[in-house]
């Protein structure tokens, strides 16, 4: 039982480290997409790019499959993130339009 508890703590420590890495990676991703949103707003480009989104879904589904991760799960995560990015891009565009008025 002590050996099992020690192994459980080891797994949980790894999970905690991975969760922290995920948060930092997402934060960096959103810093980049914020810059994209500002660029799009400054150039009056649409917040969403459905063609790019479809390409990304296909690419990440392929990567997920190669990594032995459920591609449907990967697509759900990407879709969620993409919706949030688009929401941010729309907000940036609205702020820019309001500032110009």
Image (spheres, rainbow, N blue to C red):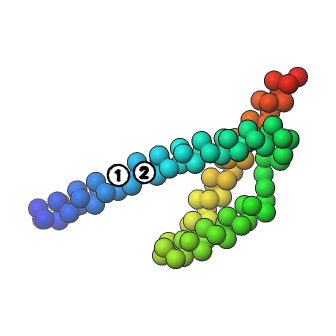
Q: Which mark is residue 82?
A: none
Vertical order, 57 against 35 (above or below)? below
* Circles 2 and 1: CB atoms closer than 8 Å: yes
Looking at the image, which is closer to me, 74 or 45? 45
What percent of the width, then of the height, locates residue 83?
69, 51
Q: Residues within 10 Å of mark 2 (few under 14, many from 20)?
A: few
Task: Give percent across and percent down for residue 50.
Answer: 79, 59
Q: Does residue 1 appear anywhere in the picture?
A: yes
As drawn, is 82 to the left or to the right of 96?
left
Residue bearing the label numbered 2: 21
Q: Is residue 87 visible?
A: no
**In the displayed structure, does residue 69 sit left or right of residue 89?**
left
Q: Mark 1 highlights which residue?
A: 17
Judged from the image, the secondary structure of the residue bearing numbered disc 1 is helix
Residue, x 56% and y 71% (percent of image)?
A: 63
Taking the spot 78% from the left edge, 43% from the top edge, the residue there is: 40
Instruction: Check the image and name the residue furthest to the left.
Output: 2
The C terminus appears in which quarter of the rendering?
top right
* Relative to 77, 58 lies left or right: right
């Amino acid at each position: 039982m002590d050996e099992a508890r020690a192994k459980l703590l080891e797994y949980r420590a790894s999970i905690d480290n991975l969760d922290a890495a995920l948060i930092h990676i997402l934060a960096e991703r959103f810093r980049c997409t914020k810059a994209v949103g500002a660029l799009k707003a400054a150039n009056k480009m649409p917040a969403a790019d459905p063609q790019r989104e479809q390409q990304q879904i296909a690419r990440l589904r392929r990567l997920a499959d190669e990594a032995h991760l459920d591609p449907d799960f990967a697509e759900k995560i990407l879709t969620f993130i993409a919706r949030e990015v688009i929401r941010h891009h729309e907000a940036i565009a609205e702020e820019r339009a309001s500032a110009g008025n």
